[in-house]
Structure formats: C-alpha cells, structure tokens
Image (cartoon, grey):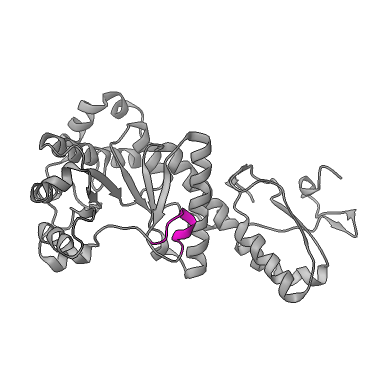
C-alpha cells in the first residue's frame, strides 16, 4: 500500500483459505507482519505462492478485503492513542456499503484498538452499535444510546428517560441531550429525576449537537472563556481554522464538553459520564486529546477511511517458477531473504 497502515489480514487470509478448500487448490500464504503491527508505505504485506491459473481470478477479491481494513485499523489506532483514557464505541455500520464492509470495519476497529492498548495502554474500543459484529469486541450484543427518534417520540428528553427507565428498570442508560437544544437543562433534569442512578454512575449524557449551532449557554466569547479557564495554553497554541472550530466552535466542541462537565459537577453529578459524538475523526481526537477534554466515551464511525483512494492495495507478481522478476520500478517488492 502507498501509505502507512496497521496490518489487518485475517478476513483476506480466511477467505483465501476457504477458496482453497472449496476448489481443492493449495496456496502458500506468508504474512510479512503480525496482525496489529505498523506497516510502512510500500512495504510488502503478504506473499502468496501458487498456481497462476488458480490465483489469477482471485486478485481483485482478496485485495478488496485487505486495503480498507488496514487503513481503518490505522485510524482507529491513532484515535485510541490520542485519547487513551477514553472508551470508544464503533458506530460506523450505517455508513458502510453493506454487511461485508461492516464486518471489515468492525474487525479493523478491534485490531487498531488492540494495538493502541498494547502500545499506549489505551482503553480503546469497548463495543459497537450492532449485534452481528459485536464479537470482534468480546461482546455478545451491540451497545448504544437512546436514539433521537425516542426523544422526539417522547416529546421531551426527560420523558424519554422516564420511558426507558419504565421499560428497563434499574438498567444504566445514556440519554441524548441535544434534541431540543437544551443540553444543560435537559441533562440536569434527567439527573435530578434519577439522583440515585446518577450518584452510582449509571447515567451517561450524550452530546451530538448539530454543527450549525452552539450548545445551550455558549457562544464564541464564552467558549473561549471556558477553555481559557481550564487549559489556557491549549487555546493559545497555533491552530488551523478546523482545529479552532473543534475547540471553540459550534457543535460538539471541546469548550462544550468542558462546559457540560462543569455544570454537571456544580450540580453534584460528578459521577455522570459524558458521551461525545459527531465527526470524531482521528484528527478531532488528536485535538481533544491535546487539551485533555473530559470525555468518558466517544461514539464514532469516523475511523472509516475518508479518502478511499488511500485504501487501494495492489498485487504484483515477483517471481515465476522461483525466478525473481517484477515490473520495472517495483524492485522494492522483491523478497529480501531470497
């Protein structure tokens, strides 16, 4: 591949081995790295040896199962590394082109997460939003929060929380607080209604505020003031326009997260957790990590590759009947041990 990645070969290798069994063929499959290892741009990923006649029609299919997973794993790895104390939940499936892609992306997130756990002692991904691929995260079902549809159906954020508690007594819940644009008021109202659950840490509030507005109580000036209070050096560093938006702009900004944390703590709800979602790419995670934003959980699908051309893996023949030969310019692919 033409960019650095985290090695994610299992789905490709399993598929090739299954084809071998179905067709009665035999391929020698030699991964160059262990699953979860970092791979530099241009480094060979796997060597496959077998009959050209039996391999030729498989090339496109096995490449489809490798490149995008490796890039998504890299993105997941960097996200978890930037926010090592934060739990992540994979919410990517609705953006995937079918169940096969959803499987690849869940697998990739789990591999990238495990790499960050090993190298940076990160918490990483603890689950995902659907049942079918939850096993990649050692879960037997998907995880999630209240959907916006429930809040709208209930008619108020508080009533939605009450309905959930009536349906699932004593079960922890995560309530969306942005539906009616009253993030602070609604978060506090839910906590005041269920003070024992809040004190036990069994309530989480999820902020998914639309990027076209500030959360309740903030504007540009107060957003700057919030970050100036908590981490002045962070806001005074050089920042791009996009980074400034993530820090003090509309939507789920760092200032918004700090402000919600402050208001919960002032009201005595310091055990209530904050779930942040909305565009949490690895770059946004880097910015949030740089100023220690008080996030407990990130819900994200933004580890999906943003630039699909970066996911293209290619295959080259490097020898015929054990005689090394390769397309001119691709000599770096030849085996070093031969």
**49, 218: nearer the viewer:** 49
At a point 12% along the width and 60% down the height, the residue shown is 162
At a point 41% along the width and 42% down the height, the residue shown is 283
Question: In the rendered structure, which segment of residues is drawn in magenta?
Answer: 133-141
Answer whether residue 60 is visible to the viewer in this image. yes
Drawn side of residue 127 relative to residue 188, left or right? right
Q: From this viewpoint, which residue is outermost toward the front?
A: 170
**232, 74: nearer the viewer:** 74
From the top left corner, tell me how far across and down residue 236 is, in percent. Answer: 30, 26
From the top left corner, tell me how far across and down residue 237 is, in percent. Answer: 34, 27
Name the quarter where the C terminus is drawn: top right
Drawn side of residue 261 relative to residue 80, left or right? left
Image quarter of residue 285: top left
At a point 11% along the width and 57% down the height, the residue shown is 158
* Residue 276: in magenta span: no
From the top left corner, tell me how far across and down residue 186 is, in percent. Answer: 11, 51
Q: From what the image shows, is residue 321 above or below residue 195?
A: below
From the top left corner, tell me how far across and down residue 40 is, in percent. Answer: 64, 42
């Amino acid at each position: 591949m033409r960019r650095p990645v985290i090695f994610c070969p299992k789905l490709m290798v399993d598929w090739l081995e299954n084809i071998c069994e179905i067709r009665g063929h035999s391929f020698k499959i030699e991964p160059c790295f262990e699953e979860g290892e970092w791979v530099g741009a241009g480094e060979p990923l796997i060597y496959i040896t077998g009959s050209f006649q039996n391999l030729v029609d498989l090339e496109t299919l096995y490449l489809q199962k490798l490149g995008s997973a490796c890039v998504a794993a890299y993105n997941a790895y960097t996200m978890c590394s930037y926010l090592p104390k934060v739990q992540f939940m994979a919410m990517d499936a609705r953006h995937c082109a079918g169940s096969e892609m959803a499987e690849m992306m869940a697998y990739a997130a789990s591999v990238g997460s495990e790499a960050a756990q090993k190298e940076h002692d990160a918490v990483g991904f603890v689950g995902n939003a659907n049942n079918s691929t939850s096993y990649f995260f050692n879960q037997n079902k998907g995880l999630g929060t209240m959907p916006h549809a429930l809040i709208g159906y209930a008619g108020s954020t508080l009533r939605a929380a009450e309905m959930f508690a009536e349906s699932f007594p004593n079960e922890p819940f995560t309530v969306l607080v942005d539906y009616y644009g009253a993030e602070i008021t609604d978060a506090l109202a839910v906590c005041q209604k269920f003070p024992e659950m809040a004190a036990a840490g069994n309530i989480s509030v999820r902020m998914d505020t639309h990027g076209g507005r500030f959360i309740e109580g903030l504007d540009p000036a107060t957003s700057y003031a919030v970050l100036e209070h908590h981490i002045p050096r962070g806001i005074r560093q050089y920042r791009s326009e996009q980074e400034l938006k993530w820090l003090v702009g509309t939507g789920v900004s760092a200032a918004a997260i700090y402000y919600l944390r402050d208001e919960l703590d002032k009201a005595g709800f310091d055990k209530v957790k904050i779930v942040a979602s909305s565009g949490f790419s690895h770059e946004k995670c880097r910015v949030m990590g740089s100023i220690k934003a008080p996030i407990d959980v990130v819900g994200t699908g933004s580890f999906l590759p943003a630039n699909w051309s970066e996911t293209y893996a290619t295959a080259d023949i490097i020898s015929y009947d054990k005689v090394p030969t390769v397309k001119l310019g691709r000599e770096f692919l030849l085996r070093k041990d031969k």
